[in-house]
Amino acid sequence: MFGGAFDPPHRAHVALAEAALGQLGLDRLYVFPTGDAWHKQRTLSPAEDRLAMAREAFAELPQVVVDDRELRRSGPTYSVDTLRELQAEHPGAALVLLMGEDQASGFERWHAWPEIARLATLAVAGRGAGEGLAALRALPGVRVESLQLPRMSESATEIRTRLAAGQDISALVDPRVASYIARHHLYTPT
Ligand SMILES: Nc1ncnc2c1ncn2[C@@H]1O[C@H](COP(=O)(O)OP(=O)(O)OP(=O)(O)O)[C@@H](O)[C@H]1O
Ligand SMILES: O=C(O)c1ccc[n+]([C@@H]2O[C@H](COP(=O)([O-])O)[C@@H](O)[C@H]2O)c1
């Protein structure tokens, strides 16, 4: 499972998914655009736009299923709820939760994290100096895998900032995502 605001999805998200598919031998990767991101300060772009962009961004990875259930769920989005559902739908499957290191550093603040740790192995991609991974490994009962991929500086924040300033984002996102953003006038001052 790979969850995120995907506001917008960018090249690092896709590289992380590819690395996980290859290195962990995943049969399938469910991508979940977040519904109500209780842990983020800002209001996210509309669900339909983030879902459509995620579908475009991951379109070339046949093992990826972009799933809208977190967008349809009411109340705050908790990954533990999604993992419980996946476990019920795929009895006996070994579940893996992907995340970047910035999320790993705050994992002990996630809702019901000990249950998440029982339900899934956490696979973490580097994004900082390594302290997020160390913090995660120090938590009791957490199974951690480290994904090997070059450090990528892309962030959705940078993309939104560049668009607001009228700058080019073509190096940071899939061309189909760039086209969706342009057609729907996303992230530009009105
Ligand atoms: N450059 C990156 N390297 C590694 N992991 C990343 C990177 N960008 C995003 N991720 C991970 O992808 C997941 C979804 O991230 P999200 O959709 O919030 O993107 P973001 O670029 O972090 O967004 P924002 O800048 O708006 O906070 C998170 O687990 C995050 O850690
Ligand atoms: O379940 C939680 O409590 C929880 C707390 C923080 C983050 N998450 C999930 O982690 C994923 C990445 O979050 P973000 O902020 O990087 O987009 C996304 O699927 C969030 O729903 C989940």
Image (cartoon, helix red, strand yellow):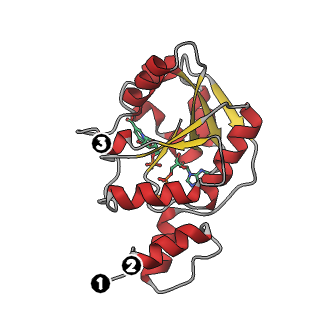
Amino acid of disc 1: Thr
Give residue 151's position: percent from left, percent from top: 71, 55
Q: Which residue in the structure is indicated by mark 2?
A: 185
Q: Which residue is mark 1?
A: 190
Query: Residue placed at 31% from the left, 56% from the top?
Result: 41
Left-right relation of 38 to 64: left
Tell me which residue sits at (52%, 19%) in the image. 90
Is 1 placed above or below 153 here? Answer: above
Residue 175 horizontal side relative to residue 112, left or right: right
Residue 114 appears in the figure: no
What is the residue that sits farthest to the left in this orientation? 75
Image quadrant in which you'd find residue 72: top left
Q: Is residue 49 above or below residue 72?
A: below
Task: Identify residue type, mark 2.
Answer: His
Q: Position of residue 37 (x, y in %)?
A: 33, 47
Q: Earlier in the sequence, mark 3 or mark 1?
A: 3
* Residue 75 disc label: none
* Residue behind mark 3: 72
Element at label 1: loop
Is the C-beta separation of discs 2 and 1 under 8 Å? yes
Residue 79 shown left or right of residue 13 in the figure: left
**Residue 165 appears in the picture as rendered:** yes
Q: CA distance from mark 2 to mark 3?
A: 24 Å
Answer with mark 2 or mark 3, whichever residue precedes in sequence: 3
Task: Name the residue type under label 3.
Answer: Arg
Q: Residues within 10 Å of mark 1 (few under 14, many from 20)?
A: few
Look at the numbered disc 3 and give the secondary structure of its residue.
helix
